[in-house]
Image: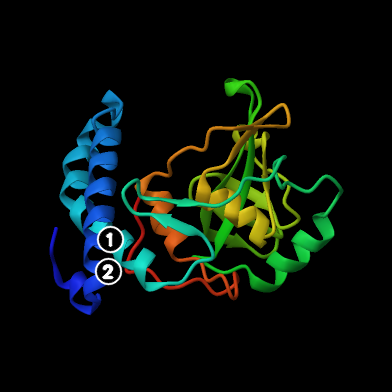
Amino acid sequence: MSMQNELWLSPEHQQTYTELCNTLYERELLRLSQTPSEQLPLLTKRLASLPFYVREAASLILKHPSPLTLDSQNACWLHSQSKVCPVPHVDESESIFSYYHKYAKLGLLVPVYIKDPQQNQLEQIRLDSIDEIDHDGQRIHCNEHGWFAMAGWPQEPDNQQKLLLKPGKAVLVAVCCGHQWRNQERKLPRLLSLREMLLASRLNWQNFAKPHPAKKDLR
């Protein structure tokens, strides 16, 4: 896994970089081994691009500062988990609309709240990116989670259990650390996929509206 990405690293970061690459590579190979049969034609392409994305994620994680603690051996971030999911418990649609009306652009990183009825109402917040904007309809399309109104409401039958949130530190801590809740109780954090790690490594914690650039997106 040693490539040009490593050249800028200081000696003390070399081991961390190697640990991140190895763990991310193993984790993604396990995920790809469970690819559904209908997606098998895409598997060869995904395997071929895997080393690039692993190195890119490890490089970005070390390059950009974060307030979170990095566990390089498990390729995850650590932070104390709030008692309940930090989703707004009052109507913040006006604030959410103001944010996306002002800052929405292609590639902007956005948090999406999910309350999954198929997992006994498990609550999570996941990171996605904007890949289409409908200015006339005042809505945005997220790469993985579909259409949302700029005020945060879901716009498709398949994402009715989701909400588009306004980025904030508490929300993005939960995103990056894989925090989960059920019945207002903390559950074991989940490990992020390689795609999620790539997105999270681009977060600009000083200004969420200006994420760090990526070479290309993992699909």
| Residue 148 x, y percent position in the rendering | 66, 49
Q: Which numbered dot is residue 110?
A: none
Position of residue 86 in the picture relative to residue 159 (left or right)? right
Residue 162 appears in the rendering: yes
User: Which residue, given by chain and number where applicable, does mark 1 sit on?
Assistant: 16
Q: Residue at x 35, y 68 (%)?
A: 62
| Residue 13 x, y percent position in the rendering | 27, 69
Q: Hey, what amino acid is under mark 1?
A: Thr
Label 2: element kind: helix
Q: Is residue 127 above or below residue 55?
A: above
Q: Quadrant of residue 133?
A: bottom right
Position of residue 209 in the picture relative to residue 178 (left or right)? right
Residue neighbourhood size for the residue with mark 2, other residues' Cα within 10 Å, grouped as few (<14), some (14–19), many (≥20):
few
User: Which residue, given by chain and number where applicable, does mark 2 sit on?
Assistant: 13
Work out which quarter of the rendered image holds the N terminus and state it.
bottom left
Label 1: element kind: helix
Residue neighbourhood size for the residue with mark 1, other residues' Cα within 10 Å, grouped as few (<14), some (14–19), many (≥20):
some
Q: Residue at x 45, y 73 (%)?
A: 212
Position of residue 39 in the picture relative to residue 117 (left or right)? left
Position of residue 10 in the picture relative to residue 1 (left or right)? right
Q: Quadrant of residue 72?
A: bottom left
Q: Hey, what amino acid is under mark 2?
A: His
Asked if marks 1 and 2 touch (Cβ < 8 Å), the reply is: yes
Q: Quadrant of residue 37?
A: top left
The extreme left residue here reads: 2
CA separation, marks 1 and 2?
Answer: 5 Å
Q: Residue at x 31, y 49 (%)?
A: 73
Q: Is residue 160 above or below residue 109?
A: above
The extreme right residue here reads: 90
Residue in the foreground of this view, choosing between 183 and 103: 183
